[in-house]
Image (tube, rainbow, N blue to C red):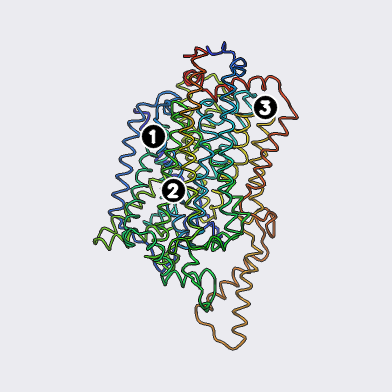
Amino acid sequence: MAEQQTDWAAIAKNPKFEEIHHRKAVFLFGWWIFSCVYYFLLPIGAGSAQGLYSVKIIGNINFGYLFALSQFFVSWAIALYYAWWANSVSDRLTSELLDELKLR
Amino acid sequence: MKKFFVIMMVALTLGVVINAVLPVVSFAGPENQIASAITAQAPAKVERVEANRAITITMFLIIVGITLGIVVWAAKRTKTTADFYAARGAITGTQNGWAIAGDYMSAASFLGIAGLISLYGYDGFMYSVGWLVAYVTVLLIVAEPCRNAGKFTMGDILSFRTNPKPVRAAAAISTVAVSTFYLTAQMVGAGKLMELLLGIPFRIAISGVGCLMIIYVVFGGMIATTWVQIIKAGLLMTGAGVLCILVAAKAGFNPVQFFSDVATNTNIQSWVQINLLKEAIPKAGFDYGQRFLEPGLLLKDVWDQISLGMALVLGTAGMPHILMRFFTVPTAQAARKSVIIAMFIIGTFYILTTLLGFGAAINVSPQLISRVDAGGNMANMLLAQMLGNQVAPLAGDFLLAFLCAVAFATILAVVSGLVLAASAAISHDIYVNIVKGGHADQHEQVRAARITSVAVGATAIIIAILAEGQNVAHLVALAFAVASSGNLPVVILALFWRKFNTAGTIAGLMVGTFVAIGLVLVSPNMQYPKIIAAGQQKISVALEQKQAGGATLTDKEKAELAKAKMLYEKNKDGSSMMGLDKPLFPLKNPGIVSIPVGFLAAVLFSLMFRRKKEEDAFDELYVRQNTGIGVAKTIAH
């Protein structure tokens, strides 16, 4: 394998890599935890706040239905936001790192 | 090409032989609610869906014809292992997005969830949410790192910096376990569906589906599997879309009107009052129609839901057939794009499903849907037939036939993906890397992969036939539980934790897998004859009291009494498969316990058996998974 010569430890200590690593960790795990909390509110709320779920908002459409529906839109929003963030932040930083290391 | 035809003939005759040899096994027993929700049940004698056989079979043949055409095309392009397992990494992000959706949405999603909504209203919709939210985990945590660090299987990622042989063996065991559970549930569901729709006998349906799936995988490998999944996803979205337009047109394309139709429908009102809330006399002023749009009619235990939610959110990202899809795209960017596209397809589909489920309740009525199939699986089919026939005579038959074909394509796409994942684990991880120590030429590796696929497929057919009449629905939950407790913790720790090592990987995989399986074995999913007997005794006591009180029983009640007594006698001395009288673990879904246990085992064993060399190798893995350096070389070697 030709890539044996690559000094991985050195890349790992490169400040640019550390920045990528840090910003990715914060973004990814932060939004992942947000999405989990938002999701688990749905079954927990259905069990403990049935009264709230039954409140009619528009005609016969109640809060519970809109909350469940919002789960889809929140998931999509996170996905699109991540795509935008990755394109403009992490992909850019990564390509800068690769240029710096002359790996391409 | 000659060799291909020989194997094709072998695959086809296999089905016939298995059919002839296996004894008829069937087990009777009551099914639980969620169970019937996921797989089809035996139809009631009164009413049934009558698919027009000529149109339906023509459509089936068209699908089989097109897909076999793809197989012939793909077979010419499948020469190396990279072709066979990963379609050369040449699938685009958009194509892979459709393929992920096709791989993921099973017949249970298409028929089961709409059925749940048509029978239980809001809770059915709430149940569907977790299946999409799961993809946030896939997108943020596993998709890109897996693309950058892996090659063909989960074992590749896990063995990157650990002692490869034991780790690959453990990874293969858990991959095969997950695939087997999921595959069995899908195959049995497929058999029952074909029986219900077309009157094709269970074994013939299973053998037919099984042989097609073997042919797709053996000859076309990942290239053919991917295209079958893409076509299926397209058909599924078309079918759901057409049906939705018909439903929405009934309410004048006005969502407020649509929900008002649900709440004011007299069939739904009496269904909620009598069948769901069991109130013989309506409470004055209570809005039973509106109650259908509120939670609590199906999912009653919050802890069980949270546990299922955890298994979905973490398990999807640990499903071997989903992970494998990320090795088919060339870059991490394409992997990201594919998950986002898949999320939009899957999410749109589940939102349309609400419309279909409630639409079926309004137009067909929950009473009729549950008479045709107690689990509601025929809701979409009944809806299609009814609304189609209102448009034009024969249009209903045509639409119904189209939906049957969609269900058929759905099953084929999902089972092919699973067979491919299981055979990759056996041939790539076990045969090539453990038995042969990584020294096998391309020709030999591809041959091993093909032989394994035939073996896995044949085994799946046999297991499915043996499981006829068994309650297999909990196997889907079990597959997700094993994937979330065994696979996902070690994948995450391998990618993100420096101190993770061989001992931690093996402990995490094995403890997570077996704790999840063990908890299901002692959970309420199993049948407990003494509990069944107690229920039957109650029925017979009630009827006998009525008789003793001087009332004469109707013929129907007499038959019920005799049946209750018979079932009581049959079950009163029995115990569950594990020899238990009642469940030891109270929840149907083990995730809430088995996921933390899996993580804990992985962490503890890593800390107990620290390995300096493996920790040093983390830099390479971490840089690679974050930057994609060395990906092209990984594919080439």
Q: Residues within 10 Å of mark 2 (few under 14, many from 20)?
A: many
- Chain letter for mark 1: B
Q: Are marks 2 and 3 in contact (CB under 8 Å)?
A: no
Whether discs 1 and 3 lie on one chain: the answer is yes
Per the image, label 1 sits on a secondary structure element best described as helix
Residue B58 position within the rendered picture, expressed as x and y whole percent measured from the top left: 28, 49
Q: Respond whether the residues carrying marks 1 and 2 are from the same subunit.
A: yes
Chain of residue at mark 2 = B
Q: Secondary structure at mark 2?
A: helix
Between the residue at mark 2 and the residue at mark 3, the CA separation in whole angstroms equals: 42 Å
B339 and B435: which one is in front? Answer: B339
Residue under numbered circle 3: B501
User: Which comes sooner in the sequence, label 1 or label 3?
Assistant: 1
Q: Secondary structure at mark 3?
A: loop
Q: Nearer the viewer, mark 2 or mark 3?
A: 3
Check disc 3 and give the amino acid type. Asn
Residue of label 1: B94
Report the Cα–Cα distance between label 1 and label 3.
36 Å
Q: Earlier in the sequence, mark 2 or mark 3?
A: 2
- 1 and 3 marks in contact (CB < 8 Å): no
Mark 1, residues whose alpha carbon is within 10 Å: few (<14), some, or many (≥20)? some
In which quadrant will I find the N terminus of chain B?
Answer: top left
Q: Could you tell me residue B603's position as x and y percent? A: 70, 34
